[in-house]
């Protein structure tokens, strides 16, 4: 009797023990399961272990309670800052019922986790980064890359059809002839790896090679996306440990452009190791034998502009993600001044993709966006739905005079030459001695700006073409007074 009571208690306790591997999440419509994994060890009132969710891998540093009701706080280092996650949960029957919040004000998200075999979802071991060397130049992007990217408008909804539609629309809208040639698939195309470790595309992309053939058939090029980490930002399969293999697969599909996003690599490497980690894919792309434009995406960390060319990078992000608002665009764009010395043919600063046409800004603001990005010699990757773009939006994106500034062969990025309050003048040297002069008004009222050529360290020009009105400005000697709309720009090409 006594013994069976002890046995009963032992069973009851172990059944209520959280120790083990748990997973939450189902296979999505794209055929990919992006699960949240809990690897837990309960020791009385203390729960330790790890939580793996999308690109993140947390170590549990605090816990309260037990199976009946518990909280877990996970932490991880992301560069120099600590990132936290918190779950509240309880064991109900065989499943964990959990809630978490993105931030203090967000609605709680509910999830159910069930037991999975030991080791499922285990985080891969760290591969030490290689020694540094210089990756050979691929000779691409002599002017900033131009094209379209799926993320800003479609995010996880991008699929084979939308990419084909966009390729069609780039041609019929005149975008291709204006210079937009790359059609870039961002995150969420990835499937599982096959038995040999080859990356596959998920159900949204039934045949990448056929898609590449289609895009190439239109005189366009196809781009793709991955991460040096085990997972991408959206939690799909990254290229970690498969760098050469993935580069070969992409080359075989006919890929022409790779955006390589730090994401899950943050769990394994410090920012000081970024260069070596990016070098690995730089080498792999060269070894693939196909000319593939290499775009680094690590949000401008670790002074990437100093080593981007060394790893074979044709462009590197200089900021976090843009949003379709004036504040986001302006805060990014007008901060780029200090980086101008680092841009040069083959190697560009990338202040992120265009939001033109996505609806969060006025046409005047989108003109400013286009003008500023062109002054910055930035990659011009449209991020809107080209099937439904209005004539006004297409006119902004395809303004040949403005594009000619962006694509100028000299490859010199503009600098801020003058500023007073909300008004700024940026100047860009162009091949053949012309200059681009952009008079920006960041204020919310129309402003009359008096420009003195001498203050811009320029001689009075003989000609000044307004690149949005396509008219020559009347030159008035040593000064030019011009009216600039709120959040607008007057963009000149002067001789
Ligand atoms: C990061 C990048 C974005 C986009 C998403 C995709 O946030 O900075 O540009 O690629 O990942 O998940």
Image (tube, grey):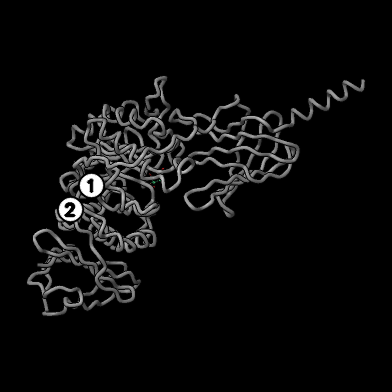
The x and y percentages for residue 371 are 24, 60
As drawn, is 278 to the left or to the right of 347? right
Residue on which the image places disc 2? 407
Asked which quadrant contains residue 68, the reply is top right
The residue drawn where x is 83% and y is 27% is 9
Identify which residue, 395 or 462, lies in the foreground.
462
Asked which quadrant contains residue 426, the reply is bottom left
- Where 367 sits versus 248, above or below? below
Identify which residue, 126 or 161, lies in the foreground.
126
Quarter of the picture holding the N terminus: top right
> SS class of the residue under badge 2?
loop
Rendered image: mark on residue 425: none
The residue drawn where x is 71% and y is 29% is 93
The x and y percentages for residue 239 are 39, 33
Identify which residue, 411 or 22, lies in the foreground.
411
- Where 238 sits versus 76, above or below? above
Taking the image in four quarters, ligand 1 sits in the one at: top left
Rendered image: mark on residue 146: 1
């Amino acid at each position: 009797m006594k013994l069976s009571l002890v046995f009963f208690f032992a069973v009851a306790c172990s059944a209520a023990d959280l120790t083990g591997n748990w997973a939450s999440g189902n296979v999505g419509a794209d055929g990919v399961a992006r699960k949240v994994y809990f690897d837990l060890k309960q020791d009385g009132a203390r729960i330790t272990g790890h939580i793996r969710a999308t690109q993140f891998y947390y170590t549990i540093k605090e816990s309260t309670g037990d199976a009946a009701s518990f909280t877990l706080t996970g932490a991880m280092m992301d560069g120099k800052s600590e990132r936290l996650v918190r779950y509240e949960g309880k064991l109900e029957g065989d499943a964990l019922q959990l809630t978490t919040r993105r931030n203090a004000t967000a609605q709680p998200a509910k999830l159910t986790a069930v037991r999975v075999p030991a080791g499922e979802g285990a985080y891969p071991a760290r591969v030490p980064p290689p020694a540094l060397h210089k990756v050979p130049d691929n000779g691409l992007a002599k002017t900033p890359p131009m094209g379209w990217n799926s993320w800003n408008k479609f995010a996880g909804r991008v699929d084979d059809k939308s990419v084909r539609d966009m390729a069609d629309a780039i041609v019929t809208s005149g975008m291709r002839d204006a210079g937009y040639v790359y059609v870039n698939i961002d995150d969420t195309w990835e499937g599982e790896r096959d038995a040999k470790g080859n990356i596959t595309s998920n159900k949204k992309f039934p045949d990448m090679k056929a898609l590449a053939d289609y895009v190439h058939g239109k005189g366009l090029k196809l781009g793709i996306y991955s991460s040096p980490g085990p997972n991408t930002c959206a939690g799909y399969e990254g290229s970690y440990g498969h760098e050469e293999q993935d580069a070969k697969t992409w080359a075989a599909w006919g890929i022409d452009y790779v955006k390589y996003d730090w994401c899950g690599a943050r769990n394994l490497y410090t920012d000081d190791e970024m260069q070596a980690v990016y070098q690995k894919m730089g080498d792999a792309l060269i070894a693939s034998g196909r000319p593939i434009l290499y775009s680094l995406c690590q949000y401008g960390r670790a002074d990437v502009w100093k080593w981007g060319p060394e790893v074979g990078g044709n462009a590197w992000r200089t900021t976090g993600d843009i949003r379709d608002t004036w504040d986001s665009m302006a805060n990014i764009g007008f901060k780029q001044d200090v980086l101008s010395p680092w841009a040069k043919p083959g190697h560009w600063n990338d202040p992120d993709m265009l939001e033109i046409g996505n609806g969060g800004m006025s046409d005047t603001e989108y003109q400013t966006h286009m003008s500023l990005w062109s002054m910055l010699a930035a990659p011009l990757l449209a991020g809107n739905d080209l099937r439904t773009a209005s004539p006004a939006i297409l006119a902004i994106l395809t303004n040949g005079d403005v594009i000619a500034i962006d694509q100028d062969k000299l490859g010199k990025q503009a600098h801020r030459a003058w500023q007073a309050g909300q008004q700024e003048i940026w100047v860009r040297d162009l091949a053949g001695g012309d200059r681009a002069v952009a008079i920006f008004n960041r204020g919310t009222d129309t402003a009359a700006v008096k420009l003195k050529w001498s203050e811009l360290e320029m001689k009075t020009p003989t000609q000044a073409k307004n690149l949005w009105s396509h008219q020559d400005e009347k030159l008035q000697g040593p000064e030019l007074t011009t009216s600039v709309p709120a959040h607008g720009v007057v963009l000149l090409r002067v001789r």
